[in-house]
Amino acid sequence: MKKVTIIPLSVEHNTFKQILELPPEAMLELIETVSVAAMMSSNLALAPNDKIAIACTMLANANAMLEQYGCEIDTTIKNKAWTNNATYKTGMDGMEGIA
């Protein structure tokens, strides 16, 4: 039996259901649009910790998608302002070391 993970969402249920039913091409366009919007947001530019948190969430979700298809992930993110690097490997609960 396949394990199903329930993720609490702030998105309205019907909106989320509509997104789930998008064809792959539309889903990819939506993901690209959201990613570009996050990169270009002037409000996020003023709050780099928020931008880092959003990027790490995007990365964690990408890792989960890749792992569903048997990929192994080994990621290290470095920043000269951080005490420790952020790391993730397949099998860990989440990214470690985000300062």
Image (tube, rainbow, N blue to C red):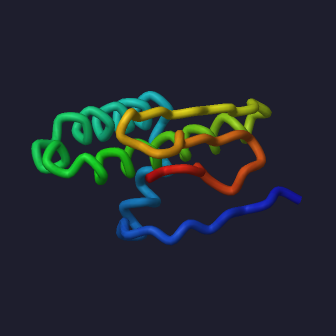
The answer to which image quadrant residue 81 occupies is top left
Q: Is residue 88 above or below residue 15?
A: above
Residue 53 in the figure: left or right of residue 43: right
93 with respect to 18 (left or right): right
Which residue occupies the foreground of this view, 20 or 41?
Answer: 41
Instruction: Report x, y in % for residue 21.
Output: 49, 48
Q: Residue at x 82, y 56 (%)?
A: 2
Residue plotted at (89% across, 59% down) = 1
Image quarter of residue 74: top right
Q: Which residue is found at the position 79% from the left and 60% from the top?
A: 3
View extreme (right): residue = 1
Residue 81 vertical position relative to residue 99 in the rendered view, above or below: above
- Residue 82, x across and y down, in percent: 42, 43
In the depicted structure, whether residue 73 falls above or below residue 56: above
Percent position of residue 73, x then y: 69, 33
Near-viewer residue (99 or 10): 99
Residue 76 is situated, as x and y percent measured from the top left of the image, at 57, 33
Tell me which residue sits at (36%, 69%) in the image. 12
